[in-house]
Image (tube, helix red, strand yellow):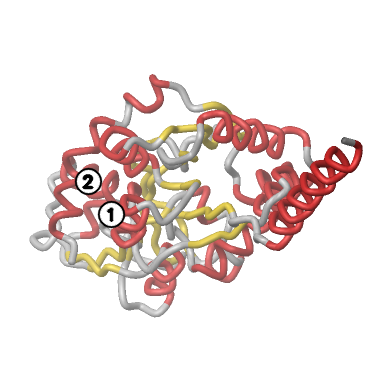
Amino acid sequence: MHKFFNYVFLAILAVSARSVFAAAIIPVKPLEVGIVPYMSARALITSYEPMRRYLEQTLGRPVKVYTSNGFKQFFLNAQRGDYDLVITASHFARILQKEDGYTPLVRFAAVGHASIVTALDSPIKTTQDLRGHILAVPDKLSLSTIVVLSYLDEQGLRSDTDYQLLEMPSFASAILSVQKGEAMAAVSAPGILAQMPEELSGSVTTIAHTGEFLRNIFLSHPHMERSYADLIKHALLKFGSDSDEGKKFIRGTGSGAIIPVTASDMGSLDRYIAETKRLLAETP
């Protein structure tokens, strides 16, 4: 009888050892984070590295950061489920929530301000001076661009009629086009200017602030368990409030605190949905 129990015990021990060994050699799947490409890939990855590292340490699993080539491609990637955690412009966030089941977690407290900038010595002093000139935009699908074009429309200025658009890959390249004389003005935002090198941000002046909007919102993919999404939410809130790296990140990005996002916040974005979907359909 003792031999039988010993045999059973050894068998269980062997199975347990094999299970532990198997678990040890199976790599943990990285948490994949997608960030909307409002800056170049290099600039984004550098800027968000403290957050990536903090999440990796807090969650105890690898964290990888991705972006894409253009706003539409990023949106399609998110719809396809390429990312576990999405950090995106608020108009995209609302569509992903309503139509694709994403769960909003947190947002940056500081609101975004769309603006129009020109070279320091530019003859363009008001929006009406844009008539007959070229306005560089980072991407027609960026919320800053949507807000600025709507503002200019209210001022009686129609794109492709009163002024021409020059679409560029990023906010930095839009401002660079002003430096090079390829455009007379560019769409920008104070928070984004604050993240640019001085040789870019210091080369322009703002001639119009055209409205404010919610900045980036963090959402979890619907495949993520709610308890794990809550864990990530808690980590992000602590990153912004308790960690030195988080405080440095917030100062550097001008994002304000990282705070919970509310149903009211998300509802306020419905006014952008129709125009965003129209542009998504038109953009190649």
Location of residue 126 in the rendering, given as x and y in whole percent from the top left corner: 30, 52
Q: Mark 1: which secondary structure? A: loop
- Asked if the residue at tag 1 contacts the one at tag 2, i.e. Cβ–Cβ closer than 8 Å, the answer is yes
Residue topped by disc 1: 141
> Which residue is found at the position 43% from the left and 60% from the top?
37
Q: Nearer the viewer, residue 214 or 132?
A: 214
Is the residue 95 above or below the residue 197 in the image? above
> Which residue is found at the position 37% from the left and 28% from the top?
266
Image quadrant in which you'd find residue 159: bottom left
Location of residue 271 in the rendering, given as x and y in whole percent from the top left corner: 23, 31
Location of residue 147 in the rendering, given as x and y in whole percent from the top left corner: 29, 44
**Residue reaching furthest left?**
161
Amino acid found under the numbered disc labelled 1: Leu
Amino acid found under the numbered disc labelled 2: Thr
Image quadrant in which you'd find residue 163: bottom left
User: 10 Å neighbourhood of mark 1: few (<14), some, or many (≥20)?
Assistant: many
Of the image marks 2 and 1, the number of the one nearer the N terminus = 1
Q: How many numbered dots are placed on residues in this image?
A: 2
Residue topped by disc 2: 276
